[in-house]
Image (cartoon, grey):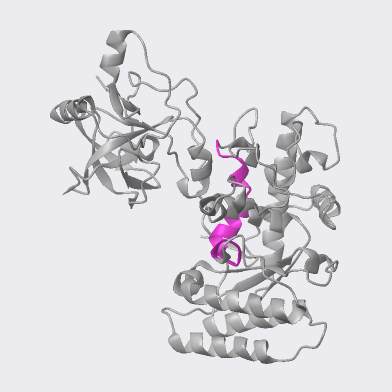
Amino acid sequence: MTHAITRQNSVVWQTSDLQAKGKVPASPKRSLSVDAPKIKEDQDLRNNASEKKKPLNVQVIGISHLVQAKSDSLMQSNKEIQVATPDSLVIDTSHALLSRRGPNQEVFDQVDLKGEPTHLWYPVLELNEESLQGLDFYIREDAFLTDNLEKVKCSETVRTPDFRKKRRQFEPHYDFPIKHTHQERSSSAIKKLKADVQAIAKRNDGPTPDVKGLIAEFCHALSKHLGGTFMSCLYGSYATGSQKAGSDVDVLFSCDNTTFGLYRDDVLPIITDFVANLHQKVGARVDDEVPPESKLIVSAQELMEAANGQVFYPQGDSKPPKIHTLSHFLEKEVALDGMKKSDSGRFGDHFLASKYLRMRLLFNILTTPNDITSNMPGTKHQIQSCVTEHLQKLSDDLKSMRNLDQYSGVEHLLGDAQGNQGEMYLGYKAERNGVIEHLEHLLKQTQPTEFDFSLPLTKV
């Protein structure tokens, strides 16, 4: 018989015990991690489970991670081992942890923190014939199959009533084309790039600098010295030409995955310095609330993940569609008037640095007025086509959820029936210049948006 172990206030419950009592306890409202000290019953049950191990050989499917429990928690753990087909495991099917941690944790950790424990994780005894016993590594139930290509039978395992459907995982891998790239990091290339950036910073560009020209010049320097494919995306008031004295400059850079892997740590401070110098030239202050690593440079893969809009579908595609906005998991009691988002208690440093917020920000950037340039022709078209397709899908799903199928405006993208708008909804702000007009334009686009692999953006 398969047993599930759940934790509630640091007590471990086994399925057989619960059935003997004639009930299953309600899903814990807190994380599986509880700071209370371990109690004797907890240890006794774990020892009992370990004495009755039921080893099973399984094969990893796709790409996933083994997660090491931390203080009886999978949510708090940051120790992982990446596994992929054809890795083989031996798991223990005598018990499993019921956790809030689901797939795509790097994106949906903020969503899972506000959810219920609905995902089963099995202890891993071996990885490719190497013992992991005693290390407390676990694997999620949908990340493996048995040697007979079957799922582990879990019919007798306790699950919460609101057990969620499996979320879709982002399977395609995207990259920009590369005419030439470095095979290893070049210190001399970094020095030459820094010299170019310093020259731009020292140059007198007059009282009204050409912001778009300066960004294009910097983007050219990036690709000239580091190789690969770079793109820049100017957004906000400078993209629409509505900037005023003191307006900050909103710009994002992206590059192919190989160059990103080689130079990301070098390029981030260089881009940060360039953006700071750009603000000095226009007499503005850098908005540093969102960390630079979350908004200045991303890989081609991450940019395309964002363009696919998956961040709004934490439960995957479903019928009827279910879309989660910020109001799904952030408290709303604290007003933001007169304070930074991070001061409100709803937008802490961890959230502001999360991939979830970065995916939302990137999708907003790509679907509001922007100016994209790249050293590879065609990249801009492919990115815009992809994000247009998925904005239209998001719009159709929202209208379906609210029975607005015949509606042709964009108000459903700006707020919901409960009064959530702007940051508490999809992130669009109606008062920003050109936002409504740009959304209307994208929703009316009818050109084919399937990937044309003769163009530079490629799926690999």
Quarter of the image with the N terminus is top left
Q: Is residue 359 visible?
A: no
Picture mark count: 0
Main SS, magenta region, reads: helix
Q: Nearer the viewer, residue 23 or 444?
A: 23
What residue do we see at 82% from left, 40% from top?
411
Q: Residue 14, position in %: x, y?
A: 27, 21
| Residue 399: quarter of image | top right
Range shown magenta: 293-315
| Residue at (72, 70) in percent of width and height | 249
Q: Is residue 352 above or below residue 257?
A: above
- In the picture provided, is 46 more to the left or to the right than 297? left
Looking at the image, which residue is at 41% across and 35% down?
Answer: 31
Q: Measuring from the top left, give residue 48's x and y in whole percent.
A: 16, 26
Left/right placement of residue 28 relative to residue 418 reads left
Residue 245 in percent (x, y) is at: 83, 72
Rendered view: 412 above or below 240: above
